[in-house]
Image (tube, helix red, strand yellow):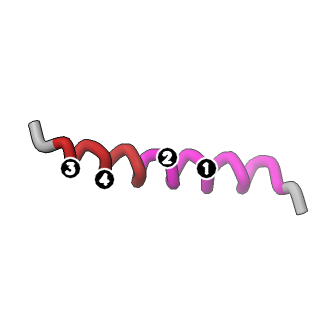
Amino acid sequence: MNLEYISQVCRLCNNALWTHYTEQNVFN
């Protein structure tokens, strides 16, 4: 497995989760 690829996917997944979370719970 390519560690660079895995870390990229993790980053994308985290970004997607964070975006979803902030859309559900907006703290401004």
Q: Which amino acid does the dot numbered 3 rest on?
A: Tyr
Q: Report if residue 25 lies within the magenta region.
A: yes
Task: State the residue position of label 1.
Answer: 18
Q: Which amino acid does the dot numbered 2 rest on?
A: Asn
Real-space CA distance between mark 1 and mark 3, rounded to the nearest whole angstrom: 20 Å
User: In terms of sequence position, does the residue under pointer 3 or pointer 2 come before the other?
Assistant: 3
User: In terms of sequence position, does the residue under pointer 4 or pointer 1 come before the other?
Assistant: 4
**Which callout, 4 or 1, points to the residue nearer the camera?**
4
Magenta residue span:
13-26
Q: Are marks 2 and 1 in contact (CB under 8 Å)?
A: yes
- Residue 26 position (above or below residue 2): below
Percent x, y for residue 4? Answer: 21, 50
**Residue with the most extreme front position:** 3
Q: Which amino acid does the dot numbered 1 rest on?
A: Trp
Task: State the residue position of label 2.
Answer: 14
Task: State the residue position of label 4.
Answer: 8
